[in-house]
Amino acid sequence: MSDGRALAREFLEQQRLLGGDPVILPDGPTPGSRPGKGQPLPPAGLSYDPPSGDLFSNDPVRQAPSLATIAQLVAACTKCRLCEGRRHTVPGEGPGDARLVVVGEGPGRVEDETGRPFVGPAGELLTKILAAIDLPRERVFICNVVKCRPPENRQPQYDEIAACVPYLFRQIELLKPQVILAMGGTAAQTVLNTKQSLGALRNQIHRFRGIPVIVTYHPAALLRNPHWKKPTWDDVRIARRLIA
Ligand code: SF4
């Protein structure tokens, strides 16, 4: 398979995982190429027969059998530029039977130093928030959209998120939580595959592959703006009520 076709397949698969419309990419001419002279034009509508089998059956992330395997894959990952400055990867942590998955944006300085998610000041606040809804941190799976620290704590860029998000999606697939709590705009937009603002996404119950998703502020934002504590508390209580 040509590099171009491999990249196209990878892109289309990522779009599919992000919730886009299904696209059927056949074995055949390179996408965008025109039929040569004498070749029959494909019929309108569905242009080709769907390919047989799972095109991505060899993808180690999609096939990862456990959270530990994903952590190993993350530890060796060099799929995006964030691998260059990291000290530790931060795959996420928590029990395999967690009913709640908390998703943040990316590791910060302390997380990068320790390899653990949400352990800096924002993490301490998250731990308190979880305790307040009677969910000890140890019973929650906590992770981020990107598993390596962006330099200077900048927002992860689109291509970095696209490279890393299969790990998050496979983690959620394995965990099958009852609720996902997306904290901050990056987490919410990534999980929900939308460009809508965090403000527009709050106060609703969304779905990710059937799992309820609640959107709220990132704890780091609460440290900067205490006025958001009350709405965050409201959101977190909704998430708590959704957990059986
Ligand atoms: Fe790999 Fe994700 Fe780290 Fe990028 S951020 S190197 S995709 S683990």
Image (tube, rainbow, N blue to C red):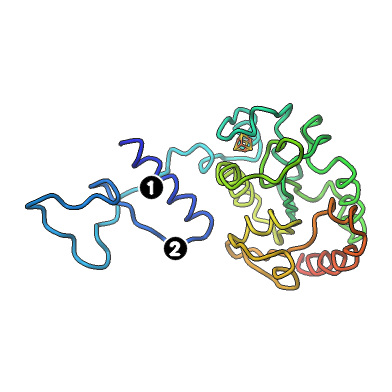
Disc 1 vs disc 2: which is toward the camera?
A: 2
Q: Quick check: 234 left or right of 85?
A: right
Location of the C terminus by quadrant is: bottom right
- Dot 2 falls on a residue whose secondary structure is loop
Binning the other alpha carbons within 10 Å of mark 1 as few (below 14), some (14 to 19) or many (20 upward) gives: few
Q: Look at the numbered disc 1 and say if its residue's Cβ is closer than 8 Å to ligand 1.
A: no
- Name the residue nearer the viewer: 84 or 97: 84
- Name the residue nearer the viewer: 225 or 175: 225
Q: CA distance from mark 1 to mark 2?
A: 17 Å
**Rendering quarter of residue 22:** bottom left
Residue 84 drawn at (x, y percent): 64, 27
Ligand 1, image quadrant it occupies: top right
Residue 238 drawn at (x, y percent): 80, 69
- Name the residue nearer the viewer: 128 or 186: 186
Q: Residue at x 93, y 60 (%)?
A: 226
Residue beneath label 1, please?
54
Q: Is residue 24 above or below residue 112?
A: below
Q: Residue at x 71, y 59 (%)?
A: 180
- Name the residue nearer the viewer: 47 or 85: 85
Residue beneath label 2, please?
21
